[in-house]
Amino acid sequence: MSFITDKQTTDELNLLGRYQSGSVYALFNRTHTPGGEQLLEKLLKTPLTDEEQINRRATVFRYFQQSGYRFPLEREQVELFSNRLDGGGSKTTVGSMFSTLKRKALSSLVHDEAYGLQAKGLTAAATVLQLLYGFLTEDMNMQDNPYEEKIREVQTILTDKDITKLRLLSGKKGEKEGEKKEDLSVKDTAYFDRLLTHTKRKDMEVVLQFIYELDVFMAVGSVAEDRNFTYAEAKPKEGNELKVKGLRHPALKNAVGNDITFNREHNLLFLTGANMAGKSTLMKSIGINLYLAHCGFPVAADEMCFTVKDGLFSSINVPDNISLGYSHFYAEVLRVKQAAELVSQKKSLLVMFDELFKGTNVKDAYEGTLEVTKAFSKYRDCLFIISTHIIEVGEALQNNMNIQFGYMPTEMEGSTPRYPYTLTEGITEDRQGMLIIQNEGILDMLK
């Protein structure tokens, strides 16, 4: 079953923006190859919903983080290798010889580049295969290696007698320093090109995919090491648990850590606090890390365990829609309706609402927030976070035993507010709005 989320949620949490500053994808993208970039994006787009698969992938990432391996190949060589495979080749020996001779003739007569690209692709393939073989046999530690089965599969391919001949074309071993290898003959070029693009093509595709996987594992592992991330433990869906120590926003360096605990008995966090106190950042931190955990990726926390969810749904920055005639308030209502439809289908979700119904008057916002919070909280297989400035709603919810109350405090240093970003039990009593307005001198400016 696919993990349930939508574009608004991934946009609000800034998960997948390849070129977007501060995105989760950009954070982890230390890859060296285009194929690695695409694989990283694919893994982040497809969270897992099986605890064994999640924990298995996390184990592989952890292994590569702890190993300290560095990617052994050059981007240009891998690209030339990949392009040569994509270029295709003849299925027969005669056809391969004919097409190679044709390219060779055209390169001499009209300076056509096809033969040169064919030769460069072969040379790059030989170099990549030989360097990869050396890395796997000399540098890779196979003891307690969770990726051993795949490594053995690739080693078998690389030690095939025909692939070995291709590897040794690189001259990376046995060649005297400064010695120049002779160019391949047309006959040998045709033979090895057919080997690469037809006879052993499927094996080469396995090797290339393996290279991209190594690229991603090493890139993600290096980020985890540098940022002091850890790995979450996934548990079966039965139950409803999320427990995190030292939770942080992964894109923020030196972020303040917070402890979070949810279960069936306490499945809704009612969150209050002033603007700039950190409510939205805390919600995003929880959502992002739970999403990463479902991908098997490292998380920004000291410890984390969770029962697998069916999906993640957020409503943090709901835009109006002028083209459809939607006001901000109506867009909020539709977003709540979407969440209600999923929850009522017995899906196990994390649902987050930041300042419900802020697009309407205070009375309607109070009543709407109160009734929606009470209705959602009854679904004990889901986790909810609902934030608001209307602290009176929290007072009206005190008798709901499964609702936990937390706030992001504001500390005053004289007339200046300071925000410690530490989640505190209870409902805020902070009312510094007018003080901040006065501090900015707005009223004096208008006198």
Image (tube, rainbow, N blue to C red):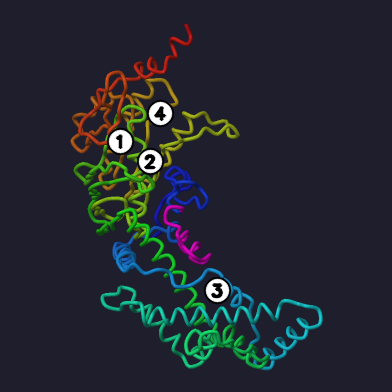
**Earlier sequence position, callout 3 versus callout 4:** 3
> What residue does disc 2 label?
340
- Mark 2–mark 1 distance (CA, rounded to whole Å): 9 Å
Per the image, label 3 sits on a secondary structure element best described as helix
> What residue does disc 4 label?
357
Which one is nearer the viewer's eye here, 302 or 108?
108
Mark 4 near mark 1, Cβ–Cβ under 8 Å? no
- Mark 4–mark 1 distance (CA, rounded to whole Å): 15 Å
- Mark 4–mark 2 distance (CA, rounded to whole Å): 15 Å
Q: Amino acid at mark 4?
A: Phe
> What residue does disc 3 label?
77
Answer few, some or many: residues within 10 Å of disc 2's Cα (few below 14, many 20 plus, some between 14 and 19): some
Please identify the dominant SS of the magenta region: helix
Determine which of the numbered discs, if any, sits on residue 375 in the image.
1
**Magenta-span inclusion, residue 40:** yes
- Mark 3–mark 2 distance (CA, rounded to whole Å): 51 Å
